[in-house]
Image: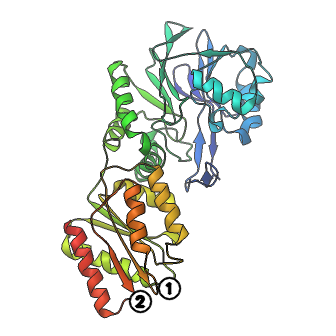
């Protein structure tokens, strides 16, 4: 007998999938060092409701296991909070068994589900404030969450049990059998929650602030926040809402992050000497240094998110910069960081354009470039190393 179903409260159960092996997500765009989960939920009141499914590679397994827990024909409603395939991927396999079951989702989710699966299922479009009676005095209340993080996203609230099914919002890529936030390693949880926000939700900070205010204005009593990835928040569930409020407000800590790539270690030496200078000038500030070619870009993005100042270094190559650095600056631009300072550095042998190129790119990415930068001809000698230390001190005081 399957052990798929885990009760989370009264007649509500988790019926998802733990993916211990996952190491890359969104193609190759997001690193998941600690795996992930695809959380699906089953509500069994007078009406039976399935909220979301799992990623398509696990579709057949999901349907088989679900069929051992419940007669699939007994599912009255399906709620699709988000059309992305890690949540909707088992719908085609499931709908083969129950093709007439209505699917409740936003108007945009109809577009994304039809666009991905090319099926004309019985879609029931909902908007913020719409409700669905599921019996025993309980209702589902729908709340549109547009751009958190897709135009089709929504959350679903279960009255009486006071559960907010938040989908991607408040999630983390963290594989665990423990289900709840108070049962997992808190360092792992904190690390994965901020990484998730930094890499996925940062561009939508202004929208998120308004949406959080809107959700709070509904005066919903929330006992559980049931996410679509990672743990369910049950111990002080609003702590993650408070974190999101902080993160959405142009978040920064007292940190300066130095990011570079290097060809023959000249730019590496500059990075280390600049870090030394920052530390000499300000003993309180956190300084972190990352060689992009030897670091995970999503982990580095998390450090950028936490930083007040970001320094980027590259040697000059072909009158420009290393493509690895260019790609990373483009990623930072995509994420629309706000209220962050920047400065550039690099070594060169002949033409020496890298610092100028980086200044332009960082300004275009929305950073406040606070200095013309530091460039060094050939490898840094003793005087150049001392000058790099002084440059670090200058940046620390800027």
- Identify residue for label 2: 379
Judge by depth and name the residue closer to the eye, 276 or 36. 276
Quadrant that contains the N terminus = top right
Q: Where is residue 186 in the image (x, y as percent from the top left)?
A: 40, 49
- Quarter occupied by residue 284: bottom left
Please tell me which residue is depicted at 70% across the width and 27% down the height of the picture: 114
- Which of the 4 image quadrants contains residue 132? top right
Other-residue count near label 1 (Cα within 10 Å), few / some / many at <14 / 14–19 / ≥20: few
Q: In this view, does 101 lie to the left or right of 241?
A: right
Tell me: residue 288, above or below residue 160: below
Residue at the spot x=27%, y=68% of the render?
Answer: 371
Residue 360's spot in the image, x, y percent? 40, 63
Residue plotted at (40% across, 56% down): 364
Q: Which of 81 and 193 is in front in this view?
A: 81
Check disc 2: other Cα within 10 Å, few if <14, some if 14-19, many if 20+: some
Residues at discs 2 and 1 in contact (Cβ within 8 Å): yes
Does residue 147 sit above or below 101 in this rendering?
A: below
Q: Helix or strand or loop: what does disc 1 sit on? A: loop
Vertical placement of residue 235 versus 286, above or below: above
In this view of the protein, can residue 235 be seen by the observer?
no
The reply to whether residue 30 is visible in this rendering is: yes
- The residue labelled by disc 1 is 264
Dot 2: what SS?
Answer: loop
Q: Residue at x 23, y 68 (%)?
A: 396
Relative image position of residue 342 (x, y in whole percent)? 33, 63
Label 2 to label 1: alpha-carbon separation: 8 Å
Earlier along the polypeptide chain: callout 2 or callout 1? 1
Colour mode? Answer: rainbow
């Amino acid at each position: 007998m399957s052990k798929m179903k885990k009760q989370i409260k009264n007649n509500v159960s988790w019926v998802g999938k733990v993916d211990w092996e996952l190491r890359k997500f969104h193609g190759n765009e997001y690193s998941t060092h600690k795996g992930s989960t695809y959380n699906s939920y089953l509500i069994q009141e007078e009406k039976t409701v399935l909220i979301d499914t799992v990623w398509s590679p696990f579709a057949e397994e999901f349907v088989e296991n679900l069929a051992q827990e419940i007669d699939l024909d007994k599912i009255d409603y399906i709620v699709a909070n988000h059309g992305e395939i890690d949540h909707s991927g088992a719908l085609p396999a499931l709908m083969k068994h129950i093709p007439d079951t209505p699917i409740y989702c936003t108007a945009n989710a109809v577009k994304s589900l039809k666009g991905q699966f090319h099926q004309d299922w019985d879609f029931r479009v909902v908007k913020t404030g719409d409700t669905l009676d599921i019996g025993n005095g309980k209702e589902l209340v729908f709340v549109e969450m547009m751009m958190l993080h897709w135009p089709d996203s929504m959350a679903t609230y279960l009255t009486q049990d006071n559960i907010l099914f938040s989908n991607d919002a408040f999630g983390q890529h963290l594989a665990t059998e423990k289900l709840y936030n108070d049962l997992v390693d808190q360092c792992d949880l904190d690390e994965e929650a901020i990484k998730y926000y930094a890499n996925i939700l940062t561009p939508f900070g202004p929208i998120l602030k308004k949406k959080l205010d809107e959700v709070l204005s509904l005066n919903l009593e929330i006992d559980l926040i049931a996410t679509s990835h990672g743990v369910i928040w049950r111990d002080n569930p609003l702590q993650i809402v408070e974190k999101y409020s902080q993160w959405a407000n142009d978040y920064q800590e007292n940190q300066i992050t130095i990011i570079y790539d290097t060809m023959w270690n000249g730019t590496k030496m500059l990075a280390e000497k600049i870090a030394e200078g920052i530390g000499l000038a300000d003993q309180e500030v956190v300084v972190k240094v990352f060689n992009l070619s030897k670091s995970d870009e999503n982990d580095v993005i998390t450090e950028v998110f936490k930083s007040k100042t970001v320094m980027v270094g590259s040697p000059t190559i072909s009158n420009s910069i290393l493509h690895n650095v260019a790609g990373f600056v483009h990623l930072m631009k995509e994420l629309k960081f706000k209220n962050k300072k920047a400065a550039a550095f690099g070594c060169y042998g002949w033409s020496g354009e890298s610092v100028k190129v980086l200044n332009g790119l960082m300004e275009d990415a929305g950073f406040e470039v606070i200095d013309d930068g530091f460039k060094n001809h050939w490898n840094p000698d003793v005087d150049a190393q001392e000058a790099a230390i002084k440059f670090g001190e200058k940046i620390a005081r800027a």
